[in-house]
Each structure stands twice: as C-alpha cells, then as structure tokens.
Image (cartoon, rainbow, N blue to C red):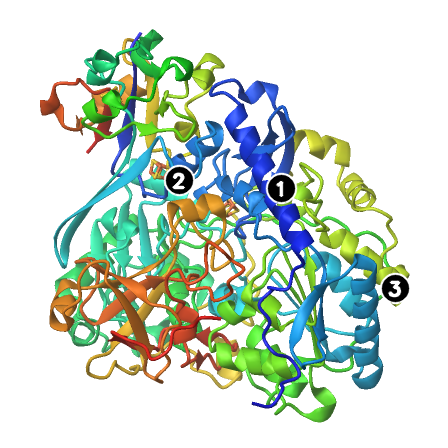
C-alpha cells in the first residue's frame, strides 16, 4: 500500500476551498493551515501562463522530517502516511527546519502539525477532506500499488511532476501538467 | 454643522454587557477547539442537519455537522444536489464563520438622541423594538399610504417580510440582483428567446465543446455548478475563449485569451456575428426553422469586418476569425456565456442581445452542450388572505415611461423614488432592508445616503453590523442561515429541485430568524390574515405535503429532485418548441425593442476613454468572498482579508509604484478612497486598466476584521451609466488615478 495524491494544475482554480475544508475538518486554528495554494505566473503581457497548485505535505518516501525527529513523534503509518503524535512531540521544530516544502507548522498548543492525508477519513472509506470538497475535482487520491485507483489511473494517462525532486525526498504528491 | 435627523452611527454604543457576552462565547469556543484532540472525531459520530447555503445565491444544498459538544463544526455539500454535487465552494465551506463571527449583531438596537443632541443606539428588547417598528410603519401608512413602504432584500428572509409590506399596501420589492446585476441579460434573452435565464442559468457547460466567456470570470466567480462543469468541460477537451482585459484564472485555462480594450465588447460580438453569417457558419436549419429577422441582421452586420473591429477592440483580425471558426466548429455545443453581473456601460441589454443572437445563429439554445431547457416547479404557498392592491408604486414616482422593459423592481428606481425630488404624493417614505448593504451594493453611495436620510423610517435586519445599520432607526439582529428555518429553495434545472434549510442549533446571542420576526410583527400590525401558520415548521410541512413530501422526509434527505414536467431538456427533430416572443420565433430582430423605441438590432457605440493619467476601473470577484457580505467572516478573511489593485508593470514604472505599496485611488470626479489599497504589479492586466476585487474597504469599525482593509470600488463608481431599456446601473464607466497621500484619513 502506498497512498499518493495527484493535483491537476490544469483544472485547479486556486479557490482555496481545500484549505478551508481542511481547517474545519481537522480543527486547524484560524491563522494556520495544513494545505495552501501556490500560483506561478510566467511570461509578459499578453503571452502569459499560470500554474496553480494546491500544496501540502508530500508524505515523502524518504522523509528528512521523520529521520530528524528526536522523540519519534514523527513517524510513518500504513500506506506511507507521515504523521505526528501530538503528545510525543516536544515542539523542538527540527522537522519544520528539515522539510524542504515548509509543510509543517507549530500548533499553538505546543506541538507540530501537518497534513495527515485525513487518515481518519480514509479509515471510514472517505476521501481526504480537500479532495472531497474541491469544486473542480482536480485532486485524485488513492493507493499507487493498486493499478485501478484513481491516482494510478490518472498518473498513467497524464504528464506529471513532483516538487523539488532534487531534494531526494521522493515526494508522493504529484502535479499533473 | 446643523444636526441632521439621521446621523450615521457606528454601532459603538453596545452596552458592556453585550460585549462581555460576546467575549465569553468566543473564549468558550476556543476552549472546545483546543480540548478536542486531533482525529478524535469522524464524520460518522457527528449529527447532521440539512441546509442550503446562504453565502451566495447559488444556494447549494448541504449538511451541517456538529461535534459531540453540539458545536457547529463544518458544512458539507449534499451529494444529491445538482447545484453542488456534494462539493461546496470555499465560501460555503467557510460559512461556519458567519455563525462564529463575534462581531455579529447581538441585540435589537434603537436610535436615541441624547441631551447633548448626539445620536446613539441603545439596546432594546424584541418587544420594544417591534412595537416601535409597528407604530412607525403604521404612521407612515396612514399619512402617505402603504404604497410608500419598500422592502429591499437579497437573500431568503425577504419571503417572510414581503407579506407584511404587501399586507400594508406596498408593491415595492427591489433586490440588487436585478438592476445591479442580471437584469440586462434577463431582458435580452427574454426579447430574443422569449425566456429569461434565471438562476442557475441553463448553460449546459458540462457537455459543451466551446465556452466563450466575455468579462465573466468563472473560477474566480465561484457559482458552484458552473465552476464544476467548466472543469468537466476542460477534462473533455472543450475549447475556452476568454475575452477580458485581465488574464483571469479562466483565461489561464483558455485556448484563446482576447485582452480586449474595455467597453468595446459589442464591436467584437457584432464582428463575430458578421464572420459567422458571411462564412455561412451558422446553423441554417435552425435559423430557418426557429428565427425571425435573419435578413435584417445580415444587412445590419455587413460592414462589421474583423479589420473594423481591430481598430476598436485591439484584437487582431486573425484572432477574431479563428475564434469565430472555433465556435462554429463546436456548434451547436457552444455557449457564448451570458455572464451574471452584466451592468457595465449602459448599453448592456444591447450587448447581451448580441450574445443571445450569436447563440441563436450557432443553434445553441435548446441543444446539448449549449443551453438546456430548464424545468421549473412550484410549491403552493401557505393559504393567506388576498392582498390589497397597491394604487401606485415607485414607478409612478419617477419619470413616466422610464425603463419600459424592466421586469423587476429596480433598487435604483426605489432610491430615486425616495429622494426629496420625488413627487410629494408618490414618494417612498420608509424602508425595511434585509441582508442588503446598500451603501456598498449600490453604485453612487452619495445618492443612496441622501435617500436614506430623507426617509421617515428605516429598519435594517442583518446578521452583521454592516455600514447600512448606521443609518437605521431600528436595527434587528437576524440569526444566520445555520440557525434558522427559511423558505424552501425551489429551483429550476435539468431537473427541478426543492431543498430544506433547518436550524442546526439555537440562534446565538439575542438574534432571531426572519420567520419569527415577521410573524411577531404581523401580530402587532394586525396582519394575522397573511400569517395563518403558527411556526415555520407548520408552514413548511404543509407546503411540502402539497408536493408529496413532508418536513420529516426533507429533514432526512435535505434536497429532493422532482421529475421533469415538460419533456426533454433539448430540442429534437420532432419537437415544436414555443418561443414566447411577439412573433413566436427566436427574434434576431427584436420586435418588442422596436415597439418600445429602441434599436431592434444591437449597435456599437463608443464609450468614454480615460483621460491622461487615468485608467479604466475594472472590478470583479475573488473565490473566497461574496460581495461585501463575507468581508468579516473569520474563516474567509483568514484566506483573504483585503483587496489589491492590479497594475501593469509599465504603468507601475511610470508612476514609480512597487508591489505591496499602499496607495489611494481617485476617480474622475475627484472621489478618493477612504483607505489605501496595496499595489499588485502584474503582467496579467492591460496597461489602460486597473482591477480590484469588489467588497473590501469597509468603514464600519465594528467589523473588526474588515475595517479599513483594502479599498471600496463602490465608492469610486460615481458615474453610473443607466440602461435606458431596463434601468440597469452600468458601473464600468469610471476611471481612476493614483494618489500617494490624502489630507485626512478616515478615523471614525
Ligand atoms: S479546492 Fe480544488 S480548485 Fe480550489 S484551490 Fe483547492 S485544489 Fe484548487
Ligand atoms: S513534505 Fe515535509 S513534512 Fe511532509 S513528509 Fe516530506 S519532508 Fe516530511
Ligand atoms: S456557490 Fe458557494 S457560496 Fe454560493 S451557495 Fe454554493 S457553496 Fe454557498
């Protein structure tokens, strides 16, 4: 089992619905977020291009954040999901520094928090909150080991990229381009 | 300065008790947040109740979930609702913020004048506030007739308040969704196809092969079903053509972006019509069978060549040709989208006529991938006594025969009828305003304020201390949509649907639902005959039973699809569609416009250009906000809490402007924004234009997150180009320049 996500930059409109849905689903305090939007404009008027990406933790196969965590609070669970156990976390912030994607934040309650791929929803047979709310249906989630999962199918069909591949983290969030 | 009868009051005199109550609510909410551990809740162990969203007027049906403590946690779309297909937009998802907003109106307020002559609000009980309203409305009614009352509403509460005013003899029910928004396209499509578009508009985007957007920015404008279907269309390889002076999000998803010179859209449309006729790309069968006036149209557009349009629109002739061909290739699965906010330059009905004609030529009306034939349904109203007939309306107070084709009450018309210049015996004297922040909704804030000051009585019913509350004699705190029953949502669509909104929780603070407010007021006014139900539940259950459902069923399912009553959603070889126009055909040449003395075929008229150093003021939407009404929502301001003014790098260089620099904008009439707005230097805008998102720059301090954030475009829209056909208020004829300083900042 290898959970992964694909985000279609050709369909995403950058509305940030995924951000609000994550905040309300996961009690992310106002002023913080587990997912966010990046918009890159290229070219000069009138020859322009925009790429819009909904970004979050990449649940890297080779994650520096898990490696550097002194207490073991950052760990892998089934399907390669990277999680933080709040009561084991001492809030040292080593993981925040080690993540090349700035995917983690310090929760005001003193621990580090980040995207969980909504594993509590996956267990109930649901999609992550961001995936299920997206009005453009531009996100695909599932098991890469299953050739019939939405994410496997779309990655077979489309060109894609990952972010900062040179960091060697083997990110598992793919961007369709 | 002489004491005005109605000074603007910031709601600042809330007693300390009110504020402490708010603070307690807030801290208890925070505690609950921090107590609940991550992951200790799941969708299955929460309670859900149905609602339909009130954050914009797409009205998506959804479910409100509460956590174990009974706190509203999230709102999620209803899978069975065709408006949202289980996915709310960011505003709908963030709708919980409306409930949690600690700046909400908390108690009825009554305007009082102190010994020093200073006017303030004091808190009052519901009983006292409603008594006062009843007394004042009756006084106005007996002095000037019930006709002199008006109800402005934009949202669901209006349906409960309407019988009060109707019962008193009024027939003035304006909503800004008409003359400030959809009106021109409704008239244009009615005069062409015999039918208005309504909401949701019957654009069959999901199956289209070519979608043409003219100044409509789906994706930033989050009307949910359209955004979803545009994405489906992209998936299926549809070509999008976006005409916009700005490289909008939609433009970035388009095959063609036509950065048109502002105000020249009709020239482009006429040229597309010319190309399609000259090249015989139109749907010949369809045109022959269903339309009227083709020969007149053909002669009319004869000289509108791409070369002619190039000089006007700055769009290269070959691009005009290619895009015309693209549309024709997709025909009839093509949509020249009518847009929604269509009040731009005062010739808007004519521009939308050109849009309608183009669709007709390509045979898209009534065809898959074009416009489907929507199916409507109606639900009987709860029995009520017949209403008295109004002897006159706002129309009698304004110049005779003005705006002959307006199909609805005009907000600007009612405002005009309320000014001291309106005739003594036909002047509107009192307003009830529900969920409509007129100073920011209406262009030309000054006139709106003048009208409000001239009124004998003004009641504002809202959830938030919006700017308009400052002009009210009585302010009533309405509870949010998450805390109330409302009228049923009854919508047309591929299938008609009904949806229920029920309270997920008790109203917070001392707020009340409109159903309760109207019912109580009816008792005090002796209008019981129009309110024969005791509770909203009783009324809804009765209504639902008339259509084979019940309140109990709707509480369980939230939304219900009803079967189509009138056949297929598309024309077929054998269908004989009826068109409700004078000729019974699709009128390319409009006989009703001709009869009313207007151009039967659309013409291009040049509009004013910005003077040296000024730029076209374009405004639009951001996905996270609805007009000015969400600007204080904690969840949504967290995503976006101010607007910026988009400036082309060439312009920025010329003025020495840098990204993020705060600047004031001044319009052609010398009006300067209350607050500075930050510069956004971007290639995504023409050099003759600037752009800003509408709805920011609030000047009421009680909106703690919205006050002073960004600037208000409404303030800058002082030149209003009124559409003579239907009275729409064209707002795009304004120009702005940059001002680095302002003598005095707004501090109050
Ligand atoms: S909800 Fe979907 S369309 Fe909106 S920003 Fe997120 S990924 Fe993009
Ligand atoms: S994105 Fe950052 S936080 Fe997430 S697994 Fe990779 S390194 Fe760790
Ligand atoms: S489009 Fe968004 S704001 Fe409008 S009704 Fe739907 S969810 Fe609510």
Q: Nearer the viewer, residue B281 or B154?
A: B154
Identify the element where label 3 is drawn: helix
Which badge, 1 or 3, comes first in the chain's sequence?
1
Identify the element where label 2 is drawn: loop
Q: Which residue is mark 3?
A: B524
Provide residue B509's location: percent of width, then percent of height. 69, 47
Q: Quadrant of residue B323?
A: bottom left
Q: Nearer the viewer, residue A26 or B376?
A: A26
Task: Give the Cα separation between the discs numbered 1 and 3.
Answer: 34 Å
- Which residue lies at the image location 47% right of the left edge and 21% below the top edge? B38
Task: Give the Cα separation between the discs numbered 1 and 2.
Answer: 21 Å
Q: Which residue is mark 2?
A: A31
Q: Which residue is mark 1?
A: B24
| Visible residue check, residue B550 | no
Circles 1 and 3 in contact, beta carbons < 8 Å: no
Disc 1 residue crowd, few under 14, some 14–19, many 20+, Cα 10 Å: few
- Which residue lies at the image location 86% right of the left edge and 50% below the top edge? B533
Identify the element where label 1 is drawn: helix
Q: Chain of mark 2?
A: A
Task: Give the Cα separation between the discs numbered 3 and 2.
Answer: 46 Å
């Amino acid at each position: 089992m290898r959970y992964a996500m694909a985000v279609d930059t050709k369909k995403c409109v950058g509305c940030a619905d995924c951000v609000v849905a994550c905040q309300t689903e996961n009690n992310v305090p106002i002023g913080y977020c587990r997912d966010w939007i990046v918009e890159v404009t290229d070219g000069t008027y009138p020859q322009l291009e925009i790429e819009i990406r909904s970004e979050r933790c990449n649940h890297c196969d080779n994650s520096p954040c898990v490696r550097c965590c002194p207490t073991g609070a950052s760990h892998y669970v089934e399907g390669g999901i990277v999680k933080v156990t709040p009561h084991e976390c001492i809030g040292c912030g080593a993981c925040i520094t080690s993540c090349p994607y700035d995917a983690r934040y310090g929760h005001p309650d003193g621990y580090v928090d980040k995207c969980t791929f909504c594993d509590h929803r996956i267990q109930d047979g649901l999609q992550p909150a961001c995936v299920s709310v997206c009005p453009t249906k531009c996100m695909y989630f599932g098991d890469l080991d299953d050739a019939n999962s939405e994410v496997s199918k779309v990655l077979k069909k489309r060109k894609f990229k990952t972010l900062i591949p040179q960091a060697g983290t083997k990110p598992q969030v793919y961007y369709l381009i | 300065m002489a004491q005005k009868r109605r000074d603007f009051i910031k709601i600042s005199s809330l007693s300390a008790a009110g504020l402490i109550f708010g603070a307690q609510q807030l801290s208890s909410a925070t505690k609950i947040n921090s107590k609940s551990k991550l992951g200790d809740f799941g969708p299955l162990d929460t309670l859900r109740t149905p609602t339909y969203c009130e954050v914009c007027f797409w009205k998506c049906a959804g479910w409100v979930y509460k956590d174990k403590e009974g706190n509203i946690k999230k709102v999620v779309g209803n899978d069975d609702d065709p408006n949202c297909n289980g996915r709310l937009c960011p505003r709908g998802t963030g709708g919980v913020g409306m409930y949690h907003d600690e700046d909400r109106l908390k108690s009825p307020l009554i305007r009082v004048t102190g010994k020093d002559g200073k006017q303030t609000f004091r808190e009052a009980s519901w009983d006292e506030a409603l008594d006062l309203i009843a007394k004042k409305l009756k006084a106005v009614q007996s002095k000037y007739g019930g006709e002199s009352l008006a109800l402005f509403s934009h949202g669901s509460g209006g349906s409960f308040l309407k019988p009060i005013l109707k019962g008193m003899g009024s027939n003035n029910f304006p909503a800004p969704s008409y003359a400030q928004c959809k009106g021109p396209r409704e008239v244009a499509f009615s005069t062409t196809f015999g039918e208005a578009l309504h909401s949701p508009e019957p654009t069959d985007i999901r199956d289209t092969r070519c979608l043409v957007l003219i100044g409509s920015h789906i994706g930033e404008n989050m009307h949910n079903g359209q955004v979803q279907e545009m994405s489906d269309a992209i998936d299926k390889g549809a070509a999008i053509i976006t005409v916009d002076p700005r490289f909008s999000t939609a433009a970035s998803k388009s095959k063609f972006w036509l950065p048109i010179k502002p105000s020249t859209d009709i020239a482009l449309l006429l040229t597309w019509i010319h190309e399609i006729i000259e090249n015989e790309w139109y749907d010949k069968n369809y045109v022959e069978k269903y339309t009227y006036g083709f020969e007149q149209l053909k002669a009319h557009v004869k000289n509108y060549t791409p070369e002619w349009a190039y000089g006007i629109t700055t769009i290269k002739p070959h691009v005009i040709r290619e895009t015309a061909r693209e549309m024709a290739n997709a025909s009839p699965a093509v949509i020249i989208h009518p847009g929604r906010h269509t009040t731009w330059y005062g010739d808007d009905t004519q521009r939308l006529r050109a849009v309608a004609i183009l669709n007709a030529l390509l045979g898209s009306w009534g065809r898959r991938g074009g416009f489907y034939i929507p199916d409507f349904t109606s639900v009987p109203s709860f029995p009520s006594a017949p209403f008295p007939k109004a002897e006159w309306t706002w129309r009698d107070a304004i110049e005779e025969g003005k705006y002959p084709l307006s199909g609805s009450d005009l907000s600007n018309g009612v405002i005009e009828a309320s000014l001291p210049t309106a005739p003594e015996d036909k002047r509107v004297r009192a307003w009830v305003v529900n969920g409509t922040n007129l100073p920011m909704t209406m262009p030309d804030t000054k006139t709106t304020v003048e009208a409000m000051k001239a009124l004998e009585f003004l009641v504002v019913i809202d959830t938030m201390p919006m700017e308009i509350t400052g002009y009210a004699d009585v302010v009533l705190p309405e509870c949010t949509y998450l805390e109330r029953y409302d009228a049923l949502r009854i919508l047309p669509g591929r299938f008609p649907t009904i949806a229920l909104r029920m309270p997920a929780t008790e109203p917070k603070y001392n707020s009340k639902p409109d159903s309760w407010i109207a019912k109580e007021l009816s008792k005090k006014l002796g209008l019981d005959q129009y309110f024969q139900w005791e509770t909203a539940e009783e009324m809804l259950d009765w209504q639902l039973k008339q259509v084979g459902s019940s309140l109990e069923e709707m509480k369980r399912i939230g939304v219900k699809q009803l079967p189509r009553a009138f056949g297929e959603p598309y024309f077929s070889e054998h269908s004989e569609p009826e068109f409700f126009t004078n000729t019974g055909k699709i009128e390319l040449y409009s006989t009703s416009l001709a009869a009313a003395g207007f151009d039967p075929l659309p013409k291009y008229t040049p509009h004013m250009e910005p003077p040296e150093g000024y730029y076209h003021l374009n405004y639009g939407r951001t996905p996270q906000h609805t007009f000015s009404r969400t600007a204080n929502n904690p969840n949504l301001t967290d995503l976006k809490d101010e607007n910026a003014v988009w400036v082309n790098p060439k312009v920025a260089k010329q003025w020495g402007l840098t990204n993020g620099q705060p600047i004031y904008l001044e319009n052609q009439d010398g009006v300067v924004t209350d607050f500075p707005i930050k510069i956004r230097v971007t290639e995504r805008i023409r050099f003759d234009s600037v752009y800003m998102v509408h709805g920011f720059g609030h000047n009421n301090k009680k909106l703690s997150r919205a006050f002073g954030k960004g600037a208000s475009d409404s303030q800058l829209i002082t030149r209003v180009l009124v559409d003579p056909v239907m009275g729409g208020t064209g707002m795009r004829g304004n120009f702005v320049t940059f001002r680095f300083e302002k003598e005095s900042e707004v501090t109050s």
